[in-house]
Image (spheres, rainbow, N blue to C red):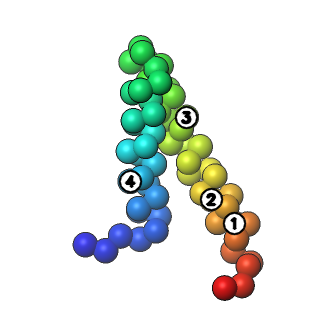
Amino acid sequence: MILSHFTALLIFAVIVSTVFALITKNAPREQFRYGIFVFLSFLAVAFAVGWIMYPLPL
C-alpha cells in the first residue's frame, strides 16, 4: 500500500492528537475539544510550512 505525503500526515496527526488529548485532559469533552484543536493545528502548520518551502529549490 502506497501512501501519499498528505495521507501519511493525516494518519500521523490523528494518532498524535488522540494520544495528546488522552494523556493531557481528564474529561471526555475536554479531550475531544483538545484533540480536534491539536489535529487542526497539525494541518495548519503543515500547510504553512509546505507553502513556505514550495519556492525553495532542491
Q: What SS does tag 4 mark?
A: helix
Report which residue position mark 3 lands on. Answer: 37
Mark earlier in primary sequence (4, 3):
4
Asked whether disc 2 touches disc 1, contact meaning CB atoms under 8 Å apart, the reply is yes
Using the numbered discs, state the Cα–Cα distance from disc 1 to disc 3 in whole angstroms. Answer: 21 Å
Report which residue position mark 2 lands on. Answer: 47
Using the numbered discs, state the Cα–Cα distance from disc 3 to disc 2 in whole angstroms. Answer: 15 Å
Q: What SS does tag 2 mark?
A: helix
Q: Give residue 30's position: percent from left, percent from top.
A: 47, 19
Q: Residue furthest bottom?
A: 58
Q: Residue at x 59, y 43 (%)?
A: 41
Characterize the local packing of mark 1: few (<14), some (14-19) or many (20 or more) Cα atoms within 10 angstroms.
few
Report which residue position mark 4 lands on. Answer: 11
Rendered-image quadrant of the N terminus: bottom left
Q: What SS does tag 3 mark?
A: helix
Report which residue position mark 1 lands on. Answer: 51
